[in-house]
Amino acid sequence: MPKGQRINFSSKLAVVAAAAGSAVGLGNIWRFPYELGQYGGAAFLIIYLVFVVLIGMPVMLSEFVIGRMGQSDAVGSFKKLAPKGKWWLIGVMGVLTSFLIMGFYAVVAGWTLEYIYQAVANQFVNKDTATLTQVFVDFCTDTWRPLIWLFVFMIISAIIIMLGVKDGIEKSTKFLMPLLFIIIVALGIRAVTLPGGVAGLKFLFQPDFSKITSGVILSAMGQAFFSLSLGMGCMITYGSYISKKNHLSHTVVEVSLMDTLIAVLAAVAIFPAVFSLGINPGYGPELVFITLPNVFAQMPGGYVWSILFFILLCVAALTSAISLMEVVVAYLVEEIKIKRLTATIWVTIIILFLGVLASLSFGVWKEVKIFNMGFFDLFDNVTSKVLMPIGGLMISVFTGWVLSRKQIRDEISTHGRFPTKYYNAYIFLVRYITPIGILFVILNQLGLGRWLGLS
Ligand code: PFF
């Protein structure tokens, strides 16, 4: 698409809504609580928050800067800003990462559709925890049912993508995000007042640092990348749709705050219930789908709450899925010059293929392992613990060391229009703290840290 003709988000609120729509999703409500449960609660939460501030926010600002300066997709923006180097390979890695994430993300999004159905059919009442667990296990190990929902979810996403970024995302997020917020708060209130619920709050807010290992640190960092949609060109692509009138650093702060708030509130809704019901907090991906139906069953008006909640969870997944697909579709349309419709169809087919692999890895293909992991876990781990951090590392090196300080200052301030109060702190973070931090966490996990005497 020639310069000047690119679609822009219509207003400031629309920018925040779209970026927050990408960030807030299954990562906050499904993935964050179960990672927190597996990795020991409060200590994980604290490390996570440190990563959001020291790594997440600088990388998000860097992605917006690259996208808005480059005025192109994740690959094209790098080509425009550094025509001679090979930096555009970061964008290519992002495109691959998008596919892999969608491979498992769409499966879980399909699960939310099943749970909308179960909520409508009033399936949660009068069932104890053991029965609700069995219902979930039977469902996700089944062959066809999850695949049908996966298919339905992908068709909906593909239709929205075909219609273009702006319309679908802006409207849905602006209206639905506050509603999601209200429901999670209501759930939280019910959960905290369950008998024995306070133990869940202790688990969440009383840190036990003896539980921290190099693996826990890497997971917290991976979760920060995943939850904020970073390290793979998503915010570069969206950055290219942001108008020059927008104050980028404010957007970064708003989106990060919103994303973190929703994740913490989701944990507040889940852990008191987990402890009250005697569910194992380290359960894994099943945690939310087992715990929350229990809470709904014990809530006044639980029937309506449960339907609303799963619809909103599905919509949150949808706005994130769209942002993931947009990374690939924008690349195919702008770099490879494929029509938007054709690109969407191909992307959908490839994601469906990966999704089938991921979905069946819970059931009939349970035994198929690569690096000792099923397809679902493989896609999940490789993206959040390897590809996104490496992408984030390269993005911060690119902004910190390749772009000139003047270029960045001009972009962030829109040529002096906005104050750049924290500009020096940002440059310092992106040059030193962010890349060294990411590298350290990765090396630490590989055991090289110990070997080099770094930890
Ligand atoms: N941030 C999304 C979530 O938390 O559910 C997932 C995601 C969306 C990751 C877009 C990466 C991305 F580019």
Image (tube, helix red, strand yellow):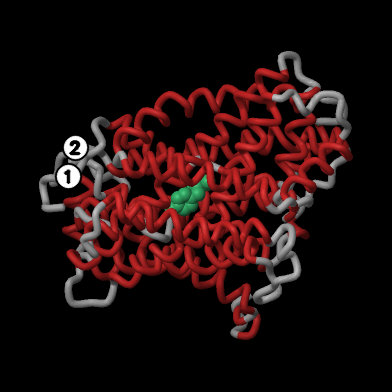
Q: Residue furthest bottom?
A: 451
- Asked if the residue at label 1 sits under 8 Å from ligand 1, the reply is no
Q: Position of residue 64 (x, y in %)?
A: 30, 51
Q: Residue at x 70, y 47 (%)?
A: 42
Q: Amino acid at mark 1?
A: Thr
| Between 416 and 174, the one nearer to me in the picture | 174
Q: Position of residue 339 (x, y in %)?
A: 24, 54
**Tally of marks:** 2
Indicate left or right for 153 with 278 as reference.
Answer: left
Q: Residue at x 47, y 38 (%)?
A: 257
Q: Quadrant of residue 291?
A: top right
Indicate left or right for 401 with 377 as reference.
Answer: left
Indicate left or right for 164 with 194 as reference.
Answer: left
| Between 115 and 278, the one nearer to me in the picture | 115
Q: Position of residue 184 (x, y in %)?
A: 62, 28
Nearer to us of marks 1 and 2 is: 2
Above or below residue 67? Residue 75 is: below
Callout 1–callout 2 Cβ contact below 8 Å? yes
Q: Amino acid at mark 2?
A: Lys
Quadrant of the rendering where the C terminus is positioned: bottom right
As helix, strand or loop, the secondary structure at mark 1 comes to loop
- Please name the residue that numbered disc 1 is placed on: 414
Q: Residue at x 55, y 51 (%)?
A: 105
- Please name the residue that numbered disc 2 is placed on: 245
- Disc 1 crowd rating (10 Å Cα; few below 14, some 14-19, many 20+) is some
Above or below residue 297? Residue 82 is: below
Q: Residue at x 40, y 45 (%)?
A: 158
In the rendered structure, which disc, 1 or 2, sits on the residue that comes first in sequence? Answer: 2
Above or below residue 416? Residue 307 is: above
- In the rendered structure, find residue 2 and report the number of the disc placed on it: none
Do we see residue 217 in this rendering?
A: no
